Image (cartoon, helix red, strand yellow):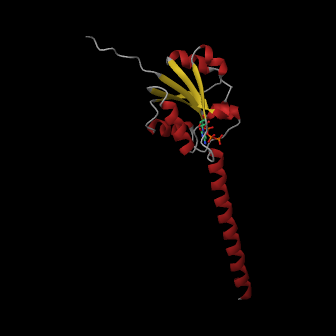
Amino acid sequence: MNKVISPQRRVLTYGTFDLFHVGHVRLLKRIADLGDELIVGCSTDGFNELKGKKSIFPYEERAEILLSCKYVSQVIPEQSWEQKESDIETYGIDCFAMGDDWAGQFDYLEGITRVVYLPRTPGISTTHVKDVVGAVIEDKKKRLRNAAKLLNEVIDRM
Ligand code: CTP
């Protein structure tokens, strides 16, 4: 009897994935579970500029980090809003999935593939990580300014 080889089910998602964090990992794991292969469209620096976003890590590094994630099979550049239909055709995508901050925004793709929105992991985002790092730096600056002020007072008393 011939062995039946079932075709690989391919899943597609897009995003900037800057300062790769656990919210990204959990989303990619759940999306990868929807098929056999996960393709991630990573927003290029040029596309981010168009979206009014500026990443800390450049595209090449964000793509390299994404590819090192065990849930990701392939990384492609996301350069425009319009490429989704042609990517779905080119890569034979069975399911398109995004975090639910995008809920409803890609329903127009339902004619050509399955569209899924998954809940975000609460309490973490790239913006949050940037805010925390920013606050730590501000605190360091404040401590250094206070130390410099004290040192000046000591010098003045000499
Ligand atoms: N995502 C998620 N859970 C989080 C953060 C992000 O599931 N806590 C998902 C988003 O819904 C999106 C994907 O990860 O589908 C890539 O999101 P991205 O915008 O790169 O990450 P954010 O952390 O949301 O970045 P920012 O704060 O710059 O918006």
Q: Residue at x 48, y 28 (%)?
A: 38
Residue 53: give x, y in percent of width and height. 68, 38
| Residue extending furthest toward the front | 1
Toward the viewer: 46 or 52? 52
Residue at the image position 58 percent from the left and 14 percent from the top: 112
Residue 142: percent from left, percent from top: 70, 67
Placement of 78 over or under 5, stated as above or below:
below
Ligand 1 quarter of the rendering: top right
Quarter where residue 68 is shown: top left
Do we see residue 49 in this rendering?
Answer: yes
Pick whichever, 45 or 112, lies toward us. Answer: 112
How many marks can you see?
Answer: 0
37 with respect to 79 (left or right): left
Find residue 72 and report its horizontal and vertical position in percent: 46, 33
Quadrant position of the N terminus in the picture: top left
Where is residue 153, by image quadrant? Answer: bottom right
Depth check, front residue: 93 or 34:
34
